[in-house]
Image (cartoon, rainbow, N blue to C red):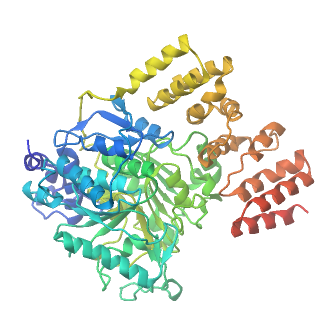
Amino acid sequence: MNIRLLLILSSGLLSFAQGAQVGQEQAQDPREDQAPVHWVTKLGIRSLQVELSFPLIDRVVLVPDAATYLDELSKWSIGGRWPVLIEDDFLTPMFLRRFRPEEIIVRDSVGEWKGHTAGKRAGLEKIVVGSWGGDPDSQSITETFAAQGYSPPGVIVTSVLDPAWTAAIALAAGRGQPLLWLDGQFGKPNATLDDAQARRLRKRVEDLIIESGLPYQVIGDAIDTLTICRSMAGKVRIQIPDNQRVPVPEKYREGPIALTDYLSRREDWSRYAFTGWIFGSEIRCVYVAMCSLFLPRESIALINTYPDQDTWKSYVMGKAADSLREQGFDVLHTQGAAAGKAPWMESLASGFGRDILIMNSKGNAGDFHLSDGVATAIDVPVCSVPTVVHFTHSWSMRSPANSATVAGRWIDHGAYAFVGSVHEPLLSAFVPPDKLAGRLVGMAPFLVACRWWTEDGILVRPCRINTFGDPLMTFPSPNRVKRQRIQQPAAYGRKLADRTRTLMGLIQTKPSGDVYRNAVKSLVLLGRDDLAIQLWRLAEQQDVGDNAAEAVLGSLFRAGLSDDFLKAWKHMDEPQERERDMLWHLMESRLNPSIKADQLEILLLALRRSMPHEDVKRLAPYVDRIFGRRRVREIIMRELERSPQPDVERALMRLLKQYP
């Protein structure tokens, strides 16, 4: 069966969207079923059609490196696709917990990914061609698409010199998009380009699209999305044009603005596409792509910390909750006192377990306001399943590669898409929740739904809202779209279940710390936190629990077993920042006058390096009571010597004055 026939068979999706009025509160009269479909609904349907047109094989393949990742992707075809992950100890188990595959295959390395730049580019393009039923030796990507009668909805800009190529190749093959190659230095994610640098980058990107020969000039033609899979600055400093219907206050006319909003515009600021951005390590970028392509998105947390009055009233979430529930989403709607600081801090103890978070807040890059208090970036929950985040808030994406910021922490904790602001944007820069929900229900891709469109007539100028993730990812209604899986056991690699059984057998015959550690890791990958915990406890009884402590830590955290977590923590040599967050989130309830001295010592040795001043501030009253004022000052002085960050130093100096 060829691609054209597969797409025809899935074209019934259009009947679902026919007549949908994107962003409106009520559905159109069904008698008007011949009304034209909105351009954004067509875009979402085009993306979802591709997903549903290829069989989804019910397996996940874990690989050790980039070369083996490519070898596995080369097996994708019109006969089926499946998730492929470069294995790690945090992102991989999280994906597997949500996807829950019938089969997990582990592969050995095929060696290094060798070759020069041109050869590597050609190799990636051949994988896309092969996955779409073309001849890799004689056809290009665009020729393959043309032969299938397929028009791609977007393009991907990447570089084989940047680790985000790992996301680019998966999204090119998975969504049916051409690869455009952009080398060079355009800043780091936390940086800001000046006007001249940004103009050069914007022109190079548009020139690449022009060279592809694909129609892109207006929204609704062919190319409507641009996916940047590479490192670049997140902001550009330009003067915001004053040619829109809503006046811009003088203090907001100077930049910065979000580079993801700037790139897909022309000189006259008119938009030709919507941009998503993926950056980071090879492991993280693979994870972002695989989550976008394969995970269901069915459970949503709506958290509103705004008062139901004045301007804030437009951003309440009741109507959004109702419309999403009607479509079959599992919705948790929190507001008022329930969105206060105490409930938030209590919820941190076992991680965030929803597919989607849409949250309204106020604050700065490193903090966010709840309905009755302020939390900081270190109070961003650790995700227990992969999460998509929309954060109505100022500054959250000022420095998205910095874990001391709200967006940086969410991304580090497992968010695979994030919408937030690089600066103070004005509240009206964000699409209100009821309109956003209507757009998502109408099949608008998530990152596209989060921007104002030309026909909205307001705030269509370049904006400060940045969009991290895959711009073609949709939220299809659980009531209407169910993606079926095909059972097709792999004839290669090794089943993780078989490896686990072998390890469990070795525990009976040749037990050792390493065997326990590997067995616990395998059980975590299989989603059996319960068995992993039991096995670690057995290792503790046999005095080899230190080897498995790091492997079981996440399981103990998700189970909320703080006492067991503390036992395992004592075996940790160099805990990472995320693991320190787990410790603090579990111990939050014990930060009171009854805290024990040994527990206090554990926390003092586990200050989070991104925001040590916040941890010291929280512990100082209890250290003062138990150990005395001198100890408080010693801790502050020690952190002053350790930290080179000016903002941390200033905060510690203020704290020092509070404890003379």
Q: Image quadrant of residue 549?
A: top right
Apparent side of residue 549 relative to residue 479 in the rendered image (left or right): right
Q: Is residue 105 positioned above or below 119 on the image?
A: above
- The answer to whether 225 appears left or right of 574 in the picture is left
| Foreground pick, 182 / 396 | 182
Q: Hey, which residue is sitting farthest top in the picture? A: 509
Instruction: Residue 342: tell me if it is visible.
Output: yes
Residue at figure coordinates x 52%, y 61% from the top left: 401
Quadrant for residue 565, please give it.
Answer: top right
- Seen in the image, is 500 located left or right of residue 135? right
What is the total number of numbered labels drawn onto the structure image?
A: 0
As drawn, which residue projects farthest toward the front? 115
For image coordinates 15% across by 57% down, the residue present is 18
Q: Which of the pair 576/98 is nearer the observer?
A: 576
Q: What quarter of the picture does the C terminus occupy?
A: bottom right
* Residue 60 on image: x %, y %: 34, 35
Q: Position of residue 95 (x, y in %)?
A: 42, 40
Q: Quadrant of the N terminus?
A: top left
User: Percent position (x, y) of residue 316?
Assistant: 46, 61
- Residue 335 in view in this figure: no
When the figure is inspected, residue 177 is found, relative to residue 271, above or below; the finding is above
Identified at 29% across, 29% down, the residue is 492
Above or below, 582 against 617 in this view is: above
Q: Is residue 68 left or right of residue 317?
A: left
x%, y% of residue 338?
A: 57, 50
